[in-house]
Structures are given as C-alpha cells and as structure tokens.
Image (cartoon, helix red, strand yellow):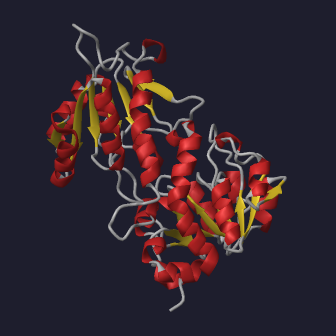
Amino acid sequence: MLVGVPKEIKVHEYRVGLTPSSVREMTMHNHSVLVQTDAGAGIGATDDDYRRAGAEIAASAEDVFTRAQMIVKVKEPQAIERAMLREGQILFTYLHLAPDPEQAADLLKSGAVCIAYETVTAPAGGLPLLAPMSEVAGRLSVQAGARCLEKSAGGMGMLLGGVAGVAPGRIVILGAGMVGTNAAQMAVGTGAEVIVIDMSIDALRRIDAMLGARVMTVFSNRDNVEREILRADLVISGVLIPGAEAPKLVTRAMLPQMKRGSVIVDVAIDQGGSCETSRPTTHADPTYVIDGVVHYMVANMPGAVPRTSTYALNNATLPFALQLANKGWRRALSDNPHLKAGLNIAAGKVTYKAVAKALNLPYTAADAVLPP
C-alpha cells in the first residue's frame, strides 16, 4: 500500500503522522511511504531522515493526497485537505466530528473511509489512541493554567504553589480519566490545593490510592461541581464521552460568580468543550476573557510539545496503521473489532452512533459497509 503523510496545516500544529522510525517499519512490511517535504520539521526530523527510513519525499500536499491510498495525519483535515480526499481513500487521524458538522459533511461527500483515532478501543477498555495525547494534554493543562494565572496573561496574578506565609492556589479538576489523572499528578507538584471531581467512585478511589492526602476527591453532582468551581483559582476539565459532545459542566450563569482572574483550561474543547462559553482557540491566540474569567481553549494542546507528542502518538497508532496497510481497511476492521470502533464515516455514511446522534444524521452500523 502507498501511505501518505502530509504536513499538518492547522495553526501552530507541528506534529506529524509518522516518524522516520514508523516509516521504516512501514517499508519493512513492503509498503511505500510518501512524505510531504518538511512534514517532520516540527519534531526535528529532516527530509533526509525520512529518505534514510525509506520514504519518498513529495513536493506538495496535493501530490500526497493524489497518490496515496491511505493518509495518516494527526489533526482533523482542514477544508483545503478535505477537498483533496477521494472515494475509497483511507483517512487515519483524529477527527472529533461531533462538534464539527462542516467537516462531517465534507467527509461524507468525499466518499473516503474515515477512521478516527479517538474512538478506537482496546481489549481491556479505554481509548488507546486518545490516551497518549490525553496524558500530554493533562500534564500541559497545569502548565498552561499557571501561565494564564499570571497578571500579564489576564489572570489574577497568582503563583499556584504560593510561598511561605501566602496561601497556595486551588486547582479543581473535572474528570478522573486519563486527562484528569495526569493533570492531578502535575498539579500536586505545584504545591497547590488539588480537588478531583468524578462520578465514578472507582476512579476516585484510584486517584486516592495514587496520590493520597495530596488530593481531595469529590463525587460529581450538581451541588459539588458548582461549589468547587466557584471556589477555584484554576479549573481543568477533562470530561469525555467517546465520540460525543462533552457535557456542559460550567454554565454561563456560573461565570459572574467565579473569582475575577480565575482560569478555565478546557481540554474537552476538541469535543465541543465542557463550558457553555467554550469556543476553540489556537496556540497563536489561546485565550479570551468572559466576566473576568480567562478561558484557555486551545484545540490542539499537545501540538505545543510536538516532539514528545508525536513519538507518544506513533507508539500507539503504528500497530493499527500497519493492520490497515497490511490487510486493507475492510479486512483489518473485520478482523479487529477495536479498530472497527474507529470507523466514523465510510461510503458516504456515518458509522459511529454518537457522531450521528450529535450531528442529527442517519446512522449506519459499521458492519453494513464491511464484507459479510
């Protein structure tokens, strides 16, 4: 199979779909890889690095999209990229379709086979291709929140850990999944007070066993969520419903009651955000302020650390990309129900139930587009 790797074009997105090491694995399985020139520059990988791994270098994205049978990316295709997709071509990347009807419409029109990293599952449960970026985003969220609390960034001018004789800040983390767990691990290192909220008692027990008295765990209900948000200096949201829009836990009515200069870091923004006032931002212009509350809503947070993020992502995605290349998408999905869970759009149909529901589109089961 000819696998194509275009350069990412989303604002300040420096990750790349395949590293040179991943390209070498692809070529060792007798596949050809076409990499757009400078696609790996953001992670320090040169065109020569890719050539040594066995790739051919393409001068343009058009060349990659025109020739490749499978496109491997990181972020959802932008409008100019979606226009280059063709019927039957495999697209393997993050899609986050639930809050993005324009992207969904373009992908349906293209006839491409669109497999989303974020809905691929694992035998033991969980989302193995979302997990590495959730780890990165969770850890970055504390770092980003700390910066936003600085006065020059619009925050209240607080050092999260405080100093001798001055109280530390208060970090409230919504969700005890992969994002929340990694955020909590970083948050305790700042010296701040840390509160983790989740509706799963098992998840809260896991956090308690991991971090002990350094974190306070709180069961998620409306009263507890509202009380803790209003007391927070920094709110980090990592709530997730696979493939669906994130629930709105921070309401518009809460903002005037929150502390002036407090910060919300919404890691759930890729799935529409967990605040009623959430809207995606970029690394070039990451924040906006409503009612004195700083909103950090960058939709590709791990793109800030592309070297770490790309290698972590490739560790997870490469085995699945090889299955698709080795077997073709129909057989690969038929053989692997966890990879089949990643199929969001194929043959002009929405094949992931949560996406269809979120976009109010007809749903077609994945099995209906696979061989009997």
Q: Nearer the viewer, residue 334 or 49?
A: 49
- Residue 272 appears in view: no
Question: Is 224 situated left or right of 336 in this image?
Answer: left
Q: x%, y% of residue 56?
A: 81, 60
In front here: 267 or 352?
267
How many numbered circles does the render carry? 0
Q: Return the residue found at the far top.
A: 165
Horizontal arrangement in the rendering, residue 226 relative to residue 87 (left or right): left
Question: Percent x, y for residue 26?
Answer: 66, 67
Is the residue 251 above or below the residue 100 in the image? above
Quarter of the view holding residue 42: top right
Left/right of residue 222 with respect to residue 239 in the rendered view:
left
Q: Is residue 97 above or below residue 213?
A: below
x, y percent for residue 4: 72, 62
Residue 91 lies in quadrant = bottom right
Q: Quadrant of the N terminus?
A: bottom right
Q: Is residue 159 visible?
A: yes
Q: Residue at x 33, y 65 (%)?
A: 125
Rendered view: 57 above or below 189: below
Which residue lies most toward the bottom here? 372
The structure residue drawn at horizontal position 40% and vertical position 24%, both measured from the top left corner, is 146
Above or below, 105 against 9 in this view is below
Which residue lies at the image location 53% right of the left edge and 68% below the top edge? 320
